[in-house]
Each structure stands twice: as C-alpha cells, then as structure tokens.
Image (cartoon, rainbow, N blue to C red):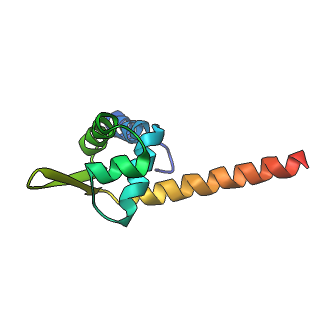
Amino acid sequence: MSSEGGFPDPLLELIAARFRLLGEPLRLKLLAALTGGERSVSELVAVTGASQPNVSKHLAALMQGGLVKRRKVGTSIYYALADPSVLTLCDIVCAGVQERFTTLAQSLQ
C-alpha cells in the first residue's frame, strides 16, 4: 500500500474482489490442494470432500478471478495455481491467526 493510502478507486475494487474470493473456506481448501501442482477436478473433489458441482463452481470463480488456470487433456480438466502470490498472502494471514489464538489461549490460562 502507498504511504498515503491514495489508491485509485478502480484498484481498490480489484483488491477487494481478490479478498472476497478468499473469503470462502472451500476456495481456500482448493488453493491449498493446488500448492503441490495441478490436479483434476475429481482429485480436488476427493481432497476437499465437496461435491463435484460445488468444486466446479468455486474453481470457476477462482479462475475468473485469476487465481487458478486450467488445462484440458482429453476429457479431463486440470487446474493449477495461476498466481502463486496468493500463497504468500495466506501464509501471512495464517501466521496472524495463529498468533492471535496463541495470545487468547495464554490469556485463558
């Protein structure tokens, strides 16, 4: 962020849209599942435990948002991370959440 916080509104809208994409737990599971490389829809269904239509719906949203990409091989479609920077963001957020829970746990003792 700039030191003055003076981002143009269109850029702020894009940033907010990216955060909205990450506000769904299944999408976070899908992104985590793709950290090891590309996977088919059926593999992602097995890993997440979600239904195929639900996985496909969320993959479409992630693809539209530029976070994942797909590759078709015959009748199978394989998905992969398109923007690995999202993993850095998730690591930062996870570290903050872990720190918060540690602080809360210590205050309860």
On screen, 64 above or below 43?
Answer: above
Residue lying at the far left in this picture: please name it: 74
Q: Nearer the viewer, residue 52 or 5?
A: 52
Q: Nearer the viewer, residue 95 or 10?
A: 95
Question: Which image quadrant for residue 26?
Answer: top left
- Tell me if 79 is positioned left or right of 14 in this view: left
Which residue is painted at 81% across and 49% down in the image?
105
Estimate the x, y position of residue 96 in percent, counting from the top left: 63, 53
Residue lying at the far bottom in this picture: please name it: 36
Q: Nearer the viewer, residue 102 or 74?
A: 74
Q: Nearer the viewer, residue 99 or 43?
A: 43
Which residue is painted at 25% across and 39% down in the image?
60
User: Could you tell me if residue 37 is visible in this image?
Assistant: yes
Residue lying at the far right in this picture: please name it: 109
Estimate the x, y position of residue 103 in percent, counting from the top left: 79, 51
Which residue is painted at 33% across and 40% down in the image?
55
Estimate the x, y position of residue 66 in percent, counting from the top left: 27, 47
User: Could you tell me if residue 22 is visible in this image?
Assistant: no
Question: Which image quadrant for residue 64?
Answer: top left
Estimate the x, y position of residue 46 in percent, counting from the top left: 37, 50
On screen, 53 above or below 95?
Answer: above
